[in-house]
Image: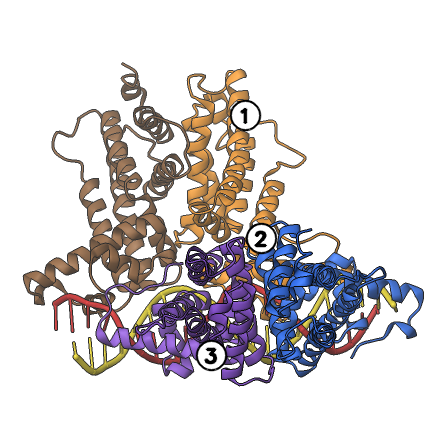
Chain colours: A purple, B blue, C brown, D orange, E yellow, F red
Amino acid sequence: MIVKSEALTSRGRRTRAALVQAGREAFEERGYDAVRIDDVCARAGVSHGTFYTYFGSREDLFREVAGAVVGEMFAASVVGTGVPEDPYARIEAANLLYLRAWASNSRLVRMLEQAATTDEGFRELLLELREVFVRRGAEGLRRLQEQGLADPALDPRLTAVMLGGMVEHFAHVWLDLGEQADERTAVAMLTTLWARAIGLTPASIGRERS
Amino acid sequence: MIVKSEALTSRGRRTRAALVQAGREAFEERGYDAVRIDDVCARAGVSHGTFYTYFGSREDLFREVAGAVVGEMFAASVVGTGVPEDPYARIEAANLLYLRAWASNSRLVRMLEQAATTDEGFRELLLELREVFVRRGAEGLRRLQEQGLADPALDPRLTAVMLGGMVEHFAHVWLDLGEQADERTAVAMLTTLWARAIGLTPASIGRERS
Amino acid sequence: MIVKSEALTSRGRRTRAALVQAGREAFEERGYDAVRIDDVCARAGVSHGTFYTYFGSREDLFREVAGAVVGEMFAASVVGTGVPEDPYARIEAANLLYLRAWASNSRLVRMLEQAATTDEGFRELLLELREVFVRRGAEGLRRLQEQGLADPALDPRLTAVMLGGMVEHFAHVWLDLGEQADERTAVAMLTTLWARAIGLTPASIGRERS
Amino acid sequence: MIVKSEALTSRGRRTRAALVQAGREAFEERGYDAVRIDDVCARAGVSHGTFYTYFGSREDLFREVAGAVVGEMFAASVVGTGVPEDPYARIEAANLLYLRAWASNSRLVRMLEQAATTDEGFRELLLELREVFVRRGAEGLRRLQEQGLADPALDPRLTAVMLGGMVEHFAHVWLDLGEQADERTAVAMLTTLWARAIGLTPASIGRERS
DNA sequence: CATGAATGAGGATTCATTCAT
DNA sequence: AATGAATGAATCCTCATTCAT
């Protein structure tokens, strides 16, 4: 079902936003299947009837929440101004953003993964999300290859999938499974492994620890 | 309450095994929350009353299934006889086993991850599973470092977590999300990235494509 | 509580009429119990809050619609000018009007019947409706009996109830249940059966097929 | 959904029958739309969960009830042994059965009519029910025509539809709408009208009041 | 041991109705 | 007059679990 959102008064918009926010928190805390619609309503301070004014089902709400999360991750992944010139530093900056983006939404993304196994729409959203990060990684590598700074034999996409996966997965074991590490060390390590894996040339690597 | 196999007649043992098998298939196909006890019983060809002769709840059954899966993965992760001497080939062999082990149980492991967010017992099982692979990776790296074949500055455990995560995660995107790659290429790529990341010395890398 | 038209502005009268019309269509199409107040409002192009400005409930609305339908049927049942002198032709003309009147409101009349099982008010309206047709039929028969053209032994009311029922019921099976017949044939047949049943004398019947 | 009825134990059969009986009474008393599943369960003395062991929905239950009613009407419509030889008496006997069959199930048949407007399955059941009575009437007429006792010009089916409708409809107004008449008078009247309408020859009619 | 009938807590959903704007 | 957001009573339906046979 299509999420209802057209033509709302400001009061309506507020209520709707409260439901989305409450839903997001509930999903985070309890996981998709444990969330009861009445929980969300109680959290948002509305009656359960009101829920159905804005959403047709829990899935509808999750669609909305997932969309918002993906949007935020897109926004967060954009390397802002002041990109360093040094390739190594650039990889490091990207990894920091990458790690944070996935870490701060770890639970919801995994719920999206779960939903994707059942629902085609969620699957597409998930693939779209991954694609953004994969593409960014692949393009970064291609640029380095063109500059003669990285191994030209590597397939950019597959490399990006694998190394990106390393970052994503680390975000998960780090935050969800309690693997001990401080962020600085983690990012440094991920960057070292990434840089070496793509064969970033010694000239750059030389600056690694300076 | 799980009735253990030991106390059962052979008929009982057969029924129990049928339930575990049916449960495993059902979990694989539909995901934890979507599995109804009746589904499992129908698949096993027993009445739902019988289920409670052997298991106290769906969670009990899943515990059993998860235990079996983890056991299989342990077994599968053991590099058998005829380990190559060449470090690169050894990494490659390990990666192949690693990839296959995770790929063939991807769905169930992710269910275990999900269950781990709620249930302490499952969390421990999951950590135990990961630990086996992390340890194996860390020890391999430590040996290479001792032999002077890998960068001695790398923290073995963290490196193993990250590079192991790369393999695990690739298994997931490859099989569950449809990322295109054939196994041979994937393993070669994972091995290249892994070897370079740990700074496997040129001597070995030189043999990479021979 | 029904707000009557008299106290309304012209805008109000228009809105009210739109609701009645929309309700009539909705009842026709979906049946009493399946009609939601929101359906009616949507069809009338007003918000559901507005409904309660004019009607207190769905039943109120149906009361209005039923009243309008009954009124139309009364009007339609009046044999207009140019009544034929020939008794047979007169019966035929009446049957045609009768058939059309019931056929064109078949669904709503049956809803009224349904409503009548529960609600005394609807029951009275229904009885009133039937009474008009029964009386007309009974009077027609009495006149023929007085003229010596019909069997004087027949009880006029009971005869009218039964033969009128034949027409009503045929209207239903013809239009609602798909019994095949063209209007001309149906009316001819109903008239033949009616005329013979009351023993319309040969003098008249002789003209039947001329 | 298909009604579940296969492979029941005797206890199950008893429970199921209790639900059907309770449903029948509830439908009779309150009408389809007013029947709550819990009402039926309370009446049958079972919990509402049990209802769903045997039926998937209220509609399913009604299907069953309607089927039973139609079956009974079929059985009741069969003119038993000792059929009179006299055509008039035969029509009278048939009308008595006809009237009783429809009168005793008037409410449920009208519910079936209502259901038929929405559901194809119910429509077919209704048409089947009508067809049995229509055919019986048409065949009776055809026999009389062959024996030269009834007007050979009448279309047997259409005549049966119309005169049968007269009986059906009278059953309704008599029992549901309170039209005053005792059964004996009603049957005599229906028979007189029916016999005359088909032009039953004076020879037979002569015996009418003997 | 196995069966399957019965139970009822739990949760989803609808929709008539109210009311502040 | 009209709006549409909010409400919550009323129902439906599922499914884990118990228990007599």
Residue D205 has which mark?
A: none
C9 on left or right of B179: left
Decide which of C163, A137 is in the foreground and name it: A137
Disc 1 target residue:
D139
Looking at the rendering, in which quadrant would you find the C terminus of chain C? top left
Which chain does the residue under circle 1 lie in? D
B92 on left or right of C120: right
| Identity, as a three-letter code, of the amino acid under mark 2 | Val
| Identity, as a three-letter code, of the amino acid under mark 3 | Ala
Q: Position of residue D204 (x, y in %)?
A: 50, 24
Q: Position of residue D56 (x, y in %)?
A: 58, 58
Instruction: Please identify, in this view, whether the residue under mark 2 or under mark 1 is nearer the observer.
Output: 2
Residue A26 has which mark?
A: 3
Q: How far apart are marks 1 and 3 (CA)?
A: 71 Å
Q: Circle 3 — which element?
A: helix
Q: Position of residue D12 (x, y in %)?
A: 73, 61
The residue that appears at 88% across and 66% down in the rendered structure is: B13
Location of residue C190 (image quadrant): top left
Label 3 Cα neighbours within 10 Å, binned few <14 / some 14-19 / many ≥20: some
Disc 2 target residue:
D65
Question: How many labels sit on residues?
Answer: 3
Location of residue D140 (image quadrant): top right
Decide which of B159, A54 is in the foreground and name it: B159
Q: Where is residue B12 in the image (x, y as percent from the top left)?
A: 88, 66
The residue that appears at 21% across and 24% down in the rendered structure is: C86
| Identity, as a three-letter code, of the amino acid under mark 1 | Glu
A97 on left or right of B127: left
Decide which of D96, D23 is in the foreground and name it: D23
